Amino acid sequence: MNEYRIVLADADTTWSKNIKAMLNKSGYWVVGEAVDGVSALKMIRSRQPDLLIIDASLPGMDGLQIARIAHEDKLAPVVVTSSSSHQGIMEKAREAKVYALLFKPVSESSLLPAVELALVNYQEVINLERNIKDLKETLETRKLVERAKGILMESMGLTEPESFRRMQRQSMNQRVSMRVVAEAVIMSYELKK
């Protein structure tokens, strides 16, 4: 098992001590503990943990607000704990993009699967987002290359394969990507207009 780094945030230090013991026993590394929301957020940003376990009702800034920030800034997945299943906690947790919601008292048999699933699912989401970004970039590059080929075909009377080979040769000679060559062709054409 990897030594995942975890930050705990709860006003109840006895609870934190118990959770820390469970996590340490299972090979996780607790790199910080906070008793209020503001110090928890500072700690999260400075220590860059792999996972956050946060109480929903922290003083100062509640755990769901921190979960929302952690999701938006891609800091780490969040497991939220709550001492009561008050009205709307599930909906608020869903809106905050929480990876798991546990009700106190938390047992080792419920904590460890929630932690493991949060870590695995978060990594999968990050990988999917990276793939989407790469695909968008590839598509954008393809569109630029197609547009540049069209410009070369129109302005120089080249066939499609000839214009592609010319751009490819330029890319290799200049040691730049096809996207850079395509952007240069497009910019040159637009400057001549």
Image (spheres, rainbow, N blue to C red):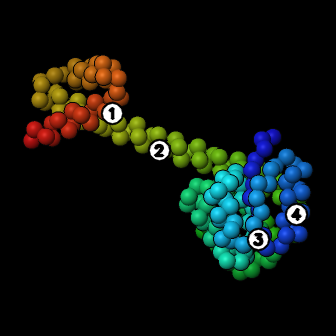
Residue to which mark 1 is pinned: 179
Residue to which mark 2 is pinned: 133
Q: Are dots 3 and 4 in contact, CB under 8 Å?
A: no
**Which class describes the residues within 10 Å of circle 2: few (<14), some (14-19), or many (20+)?**
few
Which element is circle 1 on? helix
* Amino acid of disc 3: Val
Which element is circle 3 on? loop
Q: Residue at x 27, y 22 (%)?
A: 170
Q: Nearer the viewer, mark 2 or mark 3?
A: 3
* CA gap, disc 4 and disc 1: 54 Å
* CA gap, disc 2 and disc 4: 40 Å
* CA gap, disc 2 and disc 3: 37 Å
Q: Earlier in the sequence, mark 2 or mark 4?
A: 4
Q: How many marks?
A: 4
- Quadrant location of residue 72? bottom right
Which element is circle 4 on? helix
Q: Earlier in the sequence, mark 1 or mark 3?
A: 3
Q: Are dots 2 and 3 in contact, CB under 8 Å?
A: no
Look at the image and tell me in which quarter the N terminus lies. top right
* CA gap, disc 3 and disc 4: 12 Å
64 or 37, nearer to the observer: 37
**Residue reaching furthest to the bottom:** 87
94 is higher (above) or lower (below) than 50? below
* Amino acid of disc 2: Lys
Q: Earlier in the sequence, mark 3 or mark 4?
A: 4
